[in-house]
Amino acid sequence: MAATEPKPATDTTDYGVGHVAIIMDGNGRWAKNRGWPRLVGHRKGAERVKEIVRACPDLGVRWLTVYAFSTENWKRSTEEVLGLMGIFARYIQREADGLSAEGVRMRFIGERSRLDPKLQNLMAGIEARTAGNTRLNLTVAINYGGRDEITRAAAQIAREVAEGRLALEAIDEAALSARLDTADLPDPDLVIRTSGETRTSNFLPWQAAYAEYEFTPTLWPDFTPQVLAGILERFGARERRFGGVKG
Ligand code: IPE
Ligand code: IPE
Ligand code: MG
């Protein structure tokens, strides 16, 4: 495999999208538009995740990665941060049976040591419980930042070299990929950002190097499986060249 060729998703359908990654943005504005507290928007957003997870397998999507909390989101008020952490914990507790029954394998990416130990335990627990599932791979990015992830991988490589476990000549793109949180994931085919913002906010910068991007004005709490299906259909018409030429 040429160095910059993306790792392929294991399965694709006619839409040709094996791995969809979503920057779920706009919860705060959705709530503000209704005069409600931001956390109401986050709770509605978590409901949307459930619906999208359920819809993915029938749309041919086998890998779904969602951005739930960035390394930069700690800048928000304590109330909002704690509220979000509570939503993550409840999601894991309430969805554990359903996810297992639906054949969903759940994983997390991001730096975990800064999270509440109870939440870390819930995350490890559901990862272990769903490890044998294969229908859909759901990955949730919590305290995730692409620069942080790459920095940690670089430090890991330096450690291995210093300890004599890795030769300098063995450092290539695959070696770095293998030390990212996403080591077991294929690269995303399509990155969707909701809420009309056209930036990537530190989400999967390495992995999405050749992904297609779709920016939709829909706020995340209004994002439905129908909106996703429409985006996937448009994706099918795109030609991905990976630096080569047509045909
Ligand atoms: C996305 O919604 C969720 C998180 C970043 C946790 P926002 O909370 O960023 O919503 P807006 O952008 O303020 O509308
Ligand atoms: C990106 O949204 C992070 C998540 C969706 C979790 P933000 O709302 O934090 O991004 P910025 O601040 O608008 O770039
Ligand atoms: Mg936002």
Image (cartoon, helix red, strand yellow):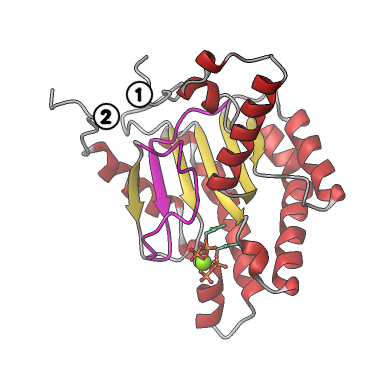
The magenta region covers 184-209
Q: Quick one: quadrant of the N terminus?
A: top left
Q: Which residue is mark 1?
A: 5
Crowdedness of circle 1 by 10 Å Cα count: few (<14), some, many (20+)?
A: few
Q: Secondary structure at mark 1?
A: loop
State the residue lying farthest toward the left: 246
Residue 3 lies, with reference to residue 107, above or below; the image says above
Q: Depth check: 201 or 155 in front?
A: 155
Instruction: Give yes or no for residue 191 being in the magenta stretch.
Output: yes
Closest to the observer, 155 or 191 = 155
**Location of residue 222 with respect to 18 vertically, above or below:** below
Residue 15's disc is none
Mark 2 element type: loop
Direction from residue 54 to residue 102 in the image, left or right: right
The part of the image, by quadrant, that contains residue 120 is top right
Q: Residue at x 60, y 24 (%)?
A: 134
Q: Tell me residue 68's x, y (percent).
A: 60, 54
Instruction: Identify the image quadrant of residue 84.
Output: bottom right
Task: Evaluate whether residue 181 shows in this view.
Answer: no
Q: Which residue is mark 2?
A: 242
Q: Pinpoint residue 135: horizontal percent, then vertical percent.
A: 57, 27
Q: Tell me if 49 is positioned left or right of 231 in this view.
A: right
Q: Is residue 14 magenta?
A: no
The C terminus lies in quadrant: top left
- Left/right placement of residue 224 relative to residue 131 reads left
Tell me the residue at 60%/27% (across/down). Answer: 179
* Mark 2 or mark 1: whose residue is earlier in sequence: 1
Q: Could you tell me the amino acid type at mark 1?
A: Glu
Magenta-colored segment: predominant secondary structure: loop
